[in-house]
């Protein structure tokens, strides 16, 4: 907390006879001097450094209020939220208001003989709750009004929000002249993660109605509200964990006695001879050494294999989280038990989607592909958002799965194609909904994809097609790590890694106002650009061999070999559909091949049509020797094809002769002669 002298108003600090509820001439002179300094500052007659009668942060707030277009001599009623928006805000702040209500009522009783306002605001200055009036309500301080520097200028709760600290303001320290007789004390309330939830304020209509004890009272009550609020949220989170999980949850105290269980645990142990709550955990678990490790655990235990006594289903995966108090003393543990077959399924699949790819599966032989793979693998070790860009079919989801399996392999991998979901359904798909949230909603509600990705990876493919209004909600989720289902009234904490992908240039979409700039920079902490297949031809042959083997295994066939003619056609093809198209072409060719060899006629029509081929034979040592006027069109096609094939082979082997000869199926001496004939000597690299 800031020093006391920075919290108290200097006017109240200097009031000479506050107990007599009077203001003497010296007090009035101080107040007038502050008014004059504020007037001179805002009229640009003096600089901020010359304002020495109030705190510097108040001076800064005066300047910001003036820059917002406010006139301190003219008071305008603050704006009021529309009924729908305010009702939504009240639902979002339900736990905060619940926690504050008892203490607001206490303050109302304590201040029953004093004219004052007691009010609650959110973190944006929206008034949520007001008790007791300042005589006539000439200030329009009512629930739903927005009081901040943009609407009324400098005020106590706005300063408390901005400074995240208790503060007291008096008279002309407020921006607007209409508040020159008011004194206010305000204190912030934070959630368990240290995020500002709102403020509690006591406002009095007279300067002498507040003192240092007024600020102390507000701080004490705000602290009590904060503790109650955090407790309510923790209880709700525990309730959610207990009621929504498919796992058995058992809570034990530091002595190993079971204090609470959820419905899943009760179902598993329904044949247990003892009452579960109140019995010792060693009556449940078979392994005494594991029980001992639970009671003395300093760190979480993840997915230990255990056996349960007296149940038909013996083997479980157990995770243990120790509960500690503020002094770091062990208060007990939470045990989560998952049947082993469920555990195995969850590790590899959720919502019907399984991951298959790791970085070991990614084929990369070209320098640029190797660099890309190494960069992606390095980024996977850090919990940062990754944006993958590339044409359709380049393997963006392969990289997304590899990043997931490198960073969060035990968690779920949930993939969402933003372009494939109708715009009117994408919000419910992402965030889920409560029972009866809309017509056609499932009766029991449904978790959204973000909620299902908790503990794992959320992969948003084609994010450039996400509607702008959903982008705004997603941005808030990324900032707060909390979601609210459609029709819901509570926030659900989520912990997921975000990987996004797009075949569009998102920065161009940002410039056209089709994609939010703030969301772009949030999701692109790390960017990976996958080049098209036509730009990494040295990967092509290894990909072909891999897909031949995969396709043959899938069809229970012996893997065929690729003829030189078919190899040439595949090497010179441009592959507009990238790796995905290549895999489909090879699958087709494997099925169409005969005698264990893939010939040109076994390739799909769109690939064959890309180049007319009259004859092609790398086995011959003879080059066309006809004179210029005797060379046929067919001969020219042959020579061009042969030259391109040699160039491709050299490129794919970093210009090594032996490797290129092996690819082309010719001897080194034959390849040397052809290289010389086509003037490619400068490309040669010896072993």
Image (cartoon, grey):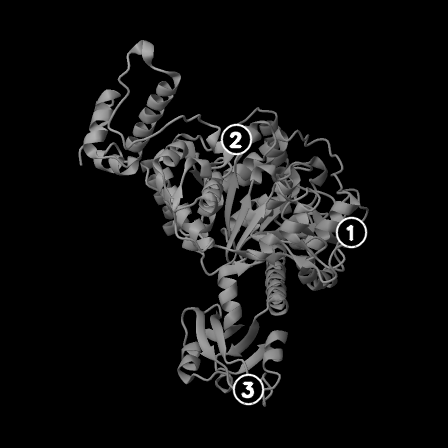
Number of on-image labels: 3
Q: What residue lies at 39% left-to-right and 52% top-to-bottom?
A: 558
Q: Residue beneath label 1, please?
A: 133
Q: Rounded to the nearest whole Å, what is the CA distance between mark 2 and mark 3? A: 61 Å
Residue ID at (35%, 23%): 638
Q: Nearer the viewer, residue 127 or 421?
A: 421
Residue 445 vertical placement versus 265 (above, below): above
Q: Pick the residue in front: 463 or 9.
A: 463
- The crowding category of the residue bearing disc 3, from other C-alpha atoms within 10 Å (few below 14, some 14 to 19, many at least 20), is some
Taking the spot 64% from the left edge, 31% from the top edge, the residue there is 68
Q: Which residue is mark 3?
A: 279
Using the numbered discs, state the Cα–Cα distance from disc 3 to disc 1 in whole angstroms. Answer: 55 Å
Q: Is residue 59 visible?
A: no
Point 50% across, 87% down: residue: 283
- Residue 123 vs 464, above or below: the answer is below
Q: CA distance from mark 1 to mark 2?
A: 52 Å
Q: Earlier in the sequence, mark 3 or mark 1?
A: 1
Give me the disc on residue 507.
2
Badge 2: residue crowd in 10 Å (few <14, some 14–19, many ≥20): some
Residue 527 appearing in the image = yes
């Amino acid at each position: 907390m800031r020093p006391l002298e920075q919290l108290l108003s200097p006017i109240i600090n200097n009031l000479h006879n506050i107990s007599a509820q009077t203001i003497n001439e010296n007090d009035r002179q101080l107040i007038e001097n502050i008014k004059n300094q504020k007037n001179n500052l805002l009229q640009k007659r003096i600089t901020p450094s010359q304002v020495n009668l109030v705190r510097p942060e108040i001076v800064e707030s005066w300047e910001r209020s003036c820059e917002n277009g406010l006139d301190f001599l003219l008071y305008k009623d603050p704006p009021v939220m529309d009924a729908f928006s305010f009702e939504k805000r009240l639902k979002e702040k339900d736990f905060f208001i619940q926690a504050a209500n008892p203490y607001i009522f206490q303050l109302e009783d304590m201040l029953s003989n004093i004219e004052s306002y007691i009010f609650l605001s959110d973190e944006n200055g929206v008034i949520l709750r007001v008790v007791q009036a300042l005589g006539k309500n000439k200030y329009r301080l009512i629930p739903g009004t927005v009081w901040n520097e943009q609407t009324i200028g400098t005020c106590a709760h706005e300063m408390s929000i901005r400074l995240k600290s208790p503060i007291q303001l008096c008279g002309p320290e407020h921006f607007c002249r209409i508040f020159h007789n008011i004194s206010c004390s305000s204190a912030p309330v934070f959630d368990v993660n240290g995020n500002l939830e709102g403020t509690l304020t006591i406002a009095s209509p007279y300067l002498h109605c507040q003192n240092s004890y007024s600020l102390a009272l507000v701080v004490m009550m705000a602290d009590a509200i904060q503790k109650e609020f955090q407790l309510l949220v923790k209880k709700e989170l525990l309730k959610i964990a207990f009621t929504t999980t498919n796992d058995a949850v058992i809570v034990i105290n530091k002595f190993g006695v079971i204090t609470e269980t959820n419905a899943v645990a009760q179902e598993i142990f329904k044949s247990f001879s003892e009452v579960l709550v109140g019995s010792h955990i060693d009556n449940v678990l078979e392994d005494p050494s594991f029980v001992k490790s639970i009671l003395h655990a300093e760190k979480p235990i993840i997915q230990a294999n255990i056996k349960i006594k007296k149940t038909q289903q013996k083997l479980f995966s157990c995770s243990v989280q120790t509960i500690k108090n503020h002094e770091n003393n062990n208060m007990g543990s939470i045990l989560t038990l998952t049947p082993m077959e469920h555990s195995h399924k969850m590790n590899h699949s959720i919502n019907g989607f399984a991951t298959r790819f790791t970085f070991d599966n990614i084929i990369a032989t070209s320098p640029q592909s190797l660099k890309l793979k190494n960069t992606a693998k390095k980024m996977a070790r850090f919990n940062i958002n990754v944006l993958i860009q590339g044409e359709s079919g380049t393997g963006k989801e392969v990289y997304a799965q590899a990043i997931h399996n490198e960073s969060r392999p035990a968690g779920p991998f949930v993939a969402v194609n933003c372009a494939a979901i109708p715009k009117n359904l994408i919000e419910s798909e992402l965030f889920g909904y409560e029972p009866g949230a809309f017509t056609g909603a499932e009766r029991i509600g449904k978790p959204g994809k973000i909620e299902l990705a908790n503990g794992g990876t959320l992969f948003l493919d084609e994010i450039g097609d996400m509607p702008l209004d959903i982008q705004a909600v997603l941005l808030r989720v990324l900032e707060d790590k909390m979601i609210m289902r459609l029709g819901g009234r509570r926030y659900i904490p989520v912990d997921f890694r975000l990987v996004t992908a797009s075949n569009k240039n998102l920065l161009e979409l940002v410039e056209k106002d089709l994609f939010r700039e703030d969301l772009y920079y949030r999701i692109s902490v790390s960017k990976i650009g996958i080049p098209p297949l036509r730009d990494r031809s040295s990967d092509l042959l290894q990909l072909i061999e891999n897909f031949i083997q995969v396709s043959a295994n899938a069809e229970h066939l012996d893997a065929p070999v690729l003829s030189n003619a078919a190899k040439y056609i595949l090497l010179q093809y441009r592959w507009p559909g990238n790796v995905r198209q290549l895999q489909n072409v090879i699958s087709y060719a494997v099925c169409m091949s005969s005698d264990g060899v893939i010939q040109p006629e076994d390739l799909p029509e769109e690939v064959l049509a890309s180049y007319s081929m009259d004859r092609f034979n790398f086995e011959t040592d003879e080059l066309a020797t006809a004179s210029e006027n005797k060379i046929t069109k067919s001969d020219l096609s042959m020579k061009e094809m042969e030259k391109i094939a040699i160039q491709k082979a050299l490129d794919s082997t970093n210009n090594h002769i032996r490797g290129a000869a092996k690819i082309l199926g010719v001897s080194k001496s034959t390849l040397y002669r052809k290289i010389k004939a086509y003037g490619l000597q400068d490309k040669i690299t010896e072993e």
